[in-house]
Image: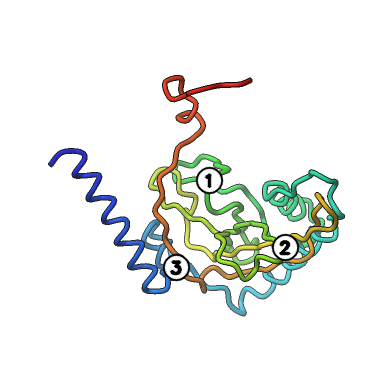
Amino acid sequence: MDNSMDIHGLIAQSVALSRTITEKGGIPFPQVIEAATGFAVHPIDDSDAEVVTRLDAVFRFILEGYETTEAGFEISVRMIEDQISEAIDCRAVTTPLACDKPRNVSGKYQASGYPDLALTCTTTGRVYYLSISTCARRALDSSLRTLYYSPSALTGKVTSPARHCMVVFLRETAEPGAEILTGFRFVDLARIRLNFKAEFNAGNRALVQSESILRTCD
């Protein structure tokens, strides 16, 4: 079988998988993580109440620190991630948590990919993986994708059994060209279902190779 036939077969399988998952209404998040990593996903329950309450306080602390941004200034997820880490590590809000950037399966710190932060409860030893995002309040009921997870045997950042959660901060336009954070949704990912979308992509390096450029302007 030549390479082109292999590619055709793989694409056909990917399309079929996407269709099947859509028809089933998605796959439970815990099944995806456990199949990809071998680590269990534990739902958040009453025994996690203190951690949930403390994280709620952290998120409210972040909101209180945001005033209307200047025109043209974009609120970034990375900025919020750093502020959450600082609020926990500096005890701006008292929590029983230690916060760290997740290491991948190779033991290296990695900024990209799910999750954004790894939290460890200092009293129970439980691990909480936290994903962070923002969403325009007007888009809450839309089908726009907010959570992304790409399994990887080399760079995956889920390296232990854990609770998995996500905070989505809500943005609103305060005035033309300026945004403000006005709320959040704190979600237990163990209770959601994931869709699947196969896609091909190209990075900047591939797109700007000399043989592919038709015109340039610097």
The numbered mark, 1 or 2, whose residue comes first in the sequence reads: 1
Q: Say which of 207 and 217 sits in front.
A: 217
What is the three-letter code of the residue carrying label 3?
A: Pro
Give me the disc on residue 170.
Answer: 2
**CB of mark 2 within 8 Å of CB of mark 3?**
no
**Label ID, residue 118:** none
Q: Nearer the viewer, residue 54 or 115?
A: 115
**Vertical placement of 22 versus 89: above or below?**
below
Q: Is residue 35 left or right of residue 57?
A: left
Q: Residues within 10 Å of mark 1 (few under 14, many from 20)?
A: some
Instruction: Report, in whole angstroms, how far the alpha carbon at label 3 lies from the one at label 1.
Output: 20 Å
Q: Position of residue 153 (x, y in %)?
A: 38, 47
Viewer-nearest of labels 2 and 3? Answer: 2
Q: Mark 1 touching mark 2, by CB under 8 A?
A: no
Q: Which residue is mark 3?
A: 30
Residue 94, by quadrant, is bottom right
On the rendered structure, is 94 left or right of 102?
Answer: right
Q: Amino acid at mark 2?
A: Leu
**Which disc is residue 103 wearing?**
1
Q: Position of residue 175 (x, y in %)?
A: 85, 55
In the rendered image, the residue lying farthest to the bottom is: 46
The label nearer to you, 3 versus 1, is 3
Q: Quadrant of the N terminus?
A: top left
Q: Residues within 10 Å of mark 3 (few under 14, many from 20)?
A: many
Distance from disc 1 to disc 2, alpha carbons, whole Å, reads 28 Å
For this view, does 29 lie left or right of residue 144? left
**SS class, disc 3:** helix
Mark whose residue sits in front, 1 or 2: 2
Point out residue 53 in the picture as x, y percentages from the top left corner.
72, 71
- Rounded to the nearest angstrom, the CA distance separating label 2 from label 3 is 25 Å
Element type where label 2 sits in the image: strand
Rendered-image quadrant of the C terminus? top right
